Image: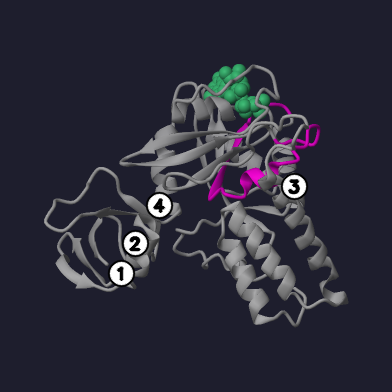
Amino acid sequence: MPANLTPEYKTAEAAFKRASEPKDRLELLRTMLRALPKHKGTDHLQAEIKTRIKELTEELAGPKKGGARRGPPTSFRAEGAAQLALIGPPNSGKSTLHARLTGSHAQTGEYPFTTLFAQPGMMPYQDIHFQLIDLPPISAEHPIPWIGNALQPADACLLVVDLCEAGCMERAVAVRDILAERKIVLSAGWPGDSAAPRLAAEHQGDPFTIHLPTLLIVNKTDLVNDPKTEIGIFEDLTDLRYPWFAVSATTGEGLDQIGPWIFTRLGIIRVYSKAPGKPPDMERPYTIRRAGTVHDVAELVHRDIAESLKFARLWRTGVYEGQHVGGEHTLVDGDVVELHA
Ligand SMILES: Nc1nc2c(ncn2[C@@H]2O[C@H](COP(=O)(O)OP(=O)(O)OP(=O)(O)O)[C@@H](O)[C@H]2O)c(=O)[nH]1
Ligand SMILES: [Mg+2]
């Protein structure tokens, strides 16, 4: 990090890291560039900010007039409780998993490089959904220029591997290394891990580095006698260490472990809203993250309500029965709130 960064720069940079809307990100990049002291020590950072501004400006400009039609979208605004990206080497079963978990008709094939574009889908879990993004394989042979853009809105990723495939270890390591070159770091730590320090990356270091919590999905276990031993060997022979599940996308074995695990490890909290004098809406909870507050829920309901929030009434089994709480009150899974603005 270059020294002598102004408070204005730091504020803009922190906001940039939290922002997910391309328009907001572009605006914040411009503020960062304006606020950045211009000297030798910031040359590199200036150049990188300018590149990102150029990329985002082009993306937001949409199809070029009279030019060739642009391809399908490469990134999707996060929907549901969290966005999870399916990444991995060719032919490991990402699309088969996507189809099975979301009911999509993602194209699958017995040959590598079947998937060419990003495709979203919704995977139900209890009364919420996770958004699952199917992606083309990540490999040295076929670089994906837009992979950084595609992973920008993701909260986490599922790294899908097929241990039966010859060369699977090198290919899995290659995925990690190719992404690292693009400043996307696959991380074994998840925000909901009680032992893990709060993701410090947000407050220090390079503003363009993304840390993606990673779950290893060892697929095609229907073809393996002893997945646990195979995974032990995989861990010994590579330096990849991620939490893992052994599954089969074709038989469905092991797949029901994924939803609850993600829910806990991302620290997701469901909050149910109610209008005064009416029963709570138990069908469609709002979702926030661990340590989230009444104010965070109000933001999800409507920005105006968040801004003019006076208090909320809170119901929590065995603890609260409609008591008044302020916007800063932290919530837990299953809370019911009635917002008063
Ligand atoms: N036996 C078995 N075969 C599987 C399983 N999952 C996927 N396959 C097969 O593996 C092949 C590749 O599956 P895809 O889902 O297309 O793999 P992919 O990772 O999306 O492939 P790319 O898009 O090329 O990266 C297909 O022939 C699938 O039927 C599984 O759990 N068990
Ligand atoms: Mg595919």
- Judging by the rendered image, the residue that carries numbered circle 3 is 177
> Is residue 138 at all visible to an observer of this figure?
yes
> Which disc is residue 309 wearing?
1
Residue 285 higher or lower than 139, as above or below: below
Between the residue at mark 3 and the residue at mark 4, the CA separation in whole angstroms equals: 28 Å
Q: Is residue 42 left or right of residue 83?
A: right
Between the residue at mark 1 and the residue at mark 2, the CA separation in whole angstroms equals: 8 Å
Q: Quarter for ligand 1?
A: top right
Q: Residue at x 31, y 71 (%)?
A: 329
Q: Is residue 156 left or right of residue 65?
A: left
- Judging by the rendered image, the residue that carries numbered circle 2 is 298
Q: Residue at x 45, y 53 (%)?
A: 265
> Is residue 224 at all visible to an observer of this figure?
no
Q: Identify the amino acid type marked 4.
A: Thr
Residue in front for this viewpoint, 16 or 177: 16
Q: Give the range drawn in magenta.
A: 138-166
**Closer to the camera: disc 1 or disc 4?**
1
Q: Is residue 165 magenta?
A: yes
Q: Identify the amino acid type marked 3.
A: Asp
Q: Identify the amino acid type marked 2.
A: Ala
Instruction: Name the element at disc 3.
Output: helix
The answer as to whether callout 2 falls within 8 Å of ligand 2 is no
Query: Residue 106, position in %: x, y?
Result: 55, 24
Q: Residue at x 70, y 65 (%)?
A: 30
In the picture, residue 319 is in which quadrant?
A: bottom left
**Closer to the camera: disc 3 or disc 2?**
2
Q: Assess disc 2: are there few (<14), some (14-19) or many (≥20) residues with their C-alpha within 10 Å of its C-alpha.
A: many
Q: Which of marks 4 and 2 is nearer the N terminus?
A: 4
